[in-house]
Amino acid sequence: MREAFAAAVATGLLVTGLLTTTVAAPTLEAGTGRAPAPADRLRLTRTLSLPQGDRVACAVPADCRLWASALQDAAAALDPVLPAGPLGAVTLVAPTAAGQAAVLGTGPGTRPAATTLRVDARMVARGAAPASQRGRTWIVVNPEVARTGGDLPRQVLVHELVHVRTLAPDLPGPLWVEEGYAVALTHRVLGPTVGPVVPASSVGAAEAAVDAALGRSAPVAGGPSGWPSDDWVPLTIDDYGVAGRIVEGLAARLGWDRVARWYAASEAGAGSLAAARAQLSGRTVIAELR
């Protein structure tokens, strides 16, 4: 998930109950008229350094080992299909609930399971991150995910590492492509039962969208019938699932290598949002897929 969408988007592997959890908005320090320092807002009390330069920083010390283990397991699961690049090191931040809201700049009620972002000057200026972290990739996790037990932390981190390893925080491409690709690759490495169960009607719609895309033989204005719109923003867990099913449908027809090339053409090779959208409408989408 790109930072610009953090207020509206929750990851496709979100715990449904977290969507309705109320989080207190960050406040100014009493009597100072300024935002609290990053250390005060995030309440981070322990940091672990991992191989390849990864770090885990937690508000609850006991959470650090859980998240460190989940991050290493997620990376190992993803390595065979999407290896980490030379700049793939991340800092996983597990703050308090209020700290999560402070980092993302969101209000009460927005509790994504995880968000991948690049620390920039704006975050530093508003006290959401220390200056030493500028330019670093953060995966900011919801602290409640660690309380669910089971495999959810690893599932969430596989999804987020897809964003990290495809440089999604820096790319201008359509959001549905980023999220659909992350959902699809998570299913590829962890199994199709991970994440949301997509209703049969939505599965049919996704398959029809794939048919429409592959059936285009000439340039046509706009995207293929049933294709997610350029301004797609997921409102439900099912929205993520449908985007993932479209990418999986393309992979089933054409192979993962071709889908990876299409993803790169619509994202990293775009250079601008307009160019990225052009990759998804007209003849170019067929050329890249085939």
Image (tube, helix red, strand yellow):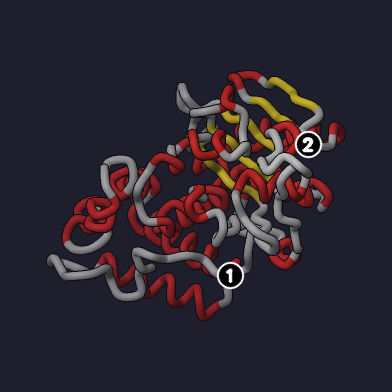
Residue 86 at x, y = what percent?
Answer: 46, 22
Q: Residue at x 85, y 32 (%)?
A: 61
Q: Is residue 53 above or below residue 161?
A: above
x 38%, y 65%: residue: 231
**Percent x, y of residue 108:** 69, 61
Q: Is residue 85 above or below residue 191?
A: above
Residue closest to the eye, 54 or 251 = 54
Mark found first going from the N terminus, 1 or 2: 2
Residue receiving disc 2: 43
Q: Would residue 151 be seen by someone viewing this image from the given angle?
A: no
Image coordinates for residue 33, horizontal then vertical, percent: 68, 43
Residue at figure coordinates x 44%, y 43% from the top left = 168
For the view shown, which residue lies furthest in the front direction? 31
Amino acid type, residue under disc 2 in the picture: Arg
Q: Is residue 181 in view from this perspective? A: yes
Q: Which residue is mark 1?
A: 236
Q: Is residue 38 left or right of residue 207?
A: right
Residue at the far right in the pictured view: 62
User: In the visual, does 77 lie left or right of 142?
Assistant: left
Helix, strand or loop under label 1: loop
Front-lying residue, 23 or 207 = 23
Q: Residue at x 66, y 40 (%)?
A: 34
Q: Is residue 244 above or below residue 147?
A: below
Left or right? Give the position of 290 relative to 168: left
**Between tags 1 and 2, which lies in front?**
2
**Cβ–Cβ under 8 Å for marks 1 and 2:** no
Q: Residue 7 in the image: x percent, y percent? A: 56, 58
The amino acid at mark 1 is: Thr
Q: Which mark is residue 158?
A: none
